[in-house]
Image: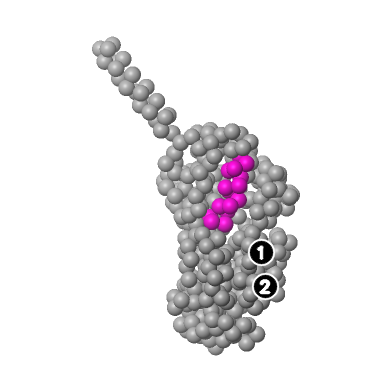
Amino acid sequence: MNKLLGAVATIALLAVADQAHAARDYVWAAGSSTVFPFSTRVAENFSKKTGKKSPKVESLGTGGGIKMFCGGAGEKFPDIANASRPMKKSEFQACQKAGVKDIVEIKIGFDGIVVAVDKKSPDYNFKLEQLYMGLADQSAKGNATVKNPYKTWKDVNPALPANRILVYGPPPTSGTRDAFVELAMEGGASKIPFLAALKKSDEKKFKAIVSPTRTDGGWVDAGENDNAIVGTIEKTPNALGVFGFSFLEENASRIKGAAINGVKPTPAAIASGQYPLSRSLYIYVKKSQVGVTPGLKEFVAEFVSDSATGRGGYLQGRGLIPLPPAAHAQMKTKATALPAMPMPKD
C-alpha cells in the first residue's frame, strides 16, 4: 500500500514538474497593428533592463488579438491584448464566458488615423461627409442612398482632385478599421441631414447602411501590415492609404497626410481632439497571469513608465501621442493596483 502511495506521489510530482517545465516563461502580447511597433519597442527595453526573455508580440489586428486573448486563461493564450479601440461589450462577455474574469484596461496614449498619399500626389482636404460618400458601399445621392456611383473624388465634390477613388485600408479585423468606420464613415454620414435623421430614429439601421465600404474596387482591404500599405500607395499613383499616424510620421519623407475638415494630422491636433480622426490606444492585461507569467507585471510597468509613454518618452519618438500628465499618472497607478475593468456599455 505504501509503495502504491509512493508511486502515485511520484507520478503526481512528475506531472507537476512537467507542467512547470511546459509553462510559458515569457510575456505574450497580441493584437493591434497600430500598437505593434510601440509594444515591440517596450519589449526590447524591458528585456534589456531586466535580463528576462524578450516578450512575444504579434500583429493580428485588434479584433483578432482580443479574440485570442479571450480564448481562455493560462499559458496557451496571450497575457495582453493590444488594441486601437476600446474592448466591446460582446468581447468582454466572451472573455468572461471563457474564464478570463479580471481584465485590466490601460490607456497608453493617442493616435490619429490618417488618409495618406505619396508625396507627388496633389494635396487633399476632405470633409468627413466626403470620405463617407466616396468610400461607402451605399452612398448618399440627393435624399437617398444608392450603390456608390462616384468614380473620382471630383465626382464627390468639385473642389477635390479628379483622381480615381482608390483607397487601401485595414481589414475588418483591425481596430483601425473599426475606428475609421466610426469616426469617418458614420461620422461623415451623420453630417448629411436625411442620414442624421435616420440615425436618430433607428441607429442600428443607420450603421448597417453607412458602415460597409464599397466592394467595386474603390476600397481595398490591404491586410494588417501598415508598412505594406505605405509601400503600395507609394507605388500606385494617386492611391490613398488609411493607417495610424505613427506610420505617417515614420515615412514622412515618402508620403503625406490629407487634412480632414481643414485640420492636418499633427501630434498637437491629435492630442487636443481637434483632428477629427483621433483615437485612444490601449493594452488589456489578464490579471490572473500576473505572478504566473514571469515578468508580466514588470512589462506592464515599463509600458506606462515615464521613459516609455510619458512626455518625451521613447515611444513619442515612434509616433505615440502621450496622455496629459494627470492621465498618465493614473495609468501608472492602474499598472500597480491592477483594478478589474467594468463591463463596457456597448
Residue 309 horizontal side relative to residue 71, left or right = right
In percent of width and height, residue 184 lies at 58, 71
Q: How is the image coloured?
A: one colour
Residue that numbered label 2 is attached to? 259
Residue 256 drawn above or below residue 306: below
Quarter of the figure that contains the N terminus: top left
Element on which disc 2 rests? strand
Residue 9 magenta-drawn? no
Please state which of residues 159 and 182 is positioned toward the viewer in this rendering. 159
Q: CA distance from mark 2 to mark 1?
A: 15 Å
Residue 188 drawn above or below residue 63: below
In percent of width and height, residue 239 lies at 55, 74
Please state which of residues 333 and 17 is positioned toward the viewer in this rendering. 17
Residue that numbered label 1 is attached to? 252
Disc 2 + disc 1, Cβ < 8 Å: no
Residue 100 drawn above or below residue 155: above
Looking at numbered disc 1 in the image, what kind of residue is underneath it?
Ala
**Which segment is the magenta one?**
32-46
Q: Main secondary structure of the magenta part?
A: helix
Residue 45 magenta-drawn? yes
Residue 333 horizontal side relative to residue 178, left or right = right
Res 165 label? none
Residue 288 horizontal side relative to residue 45, left or right = left
Q: Residue at x 50, y 57 (%)?
A: 61
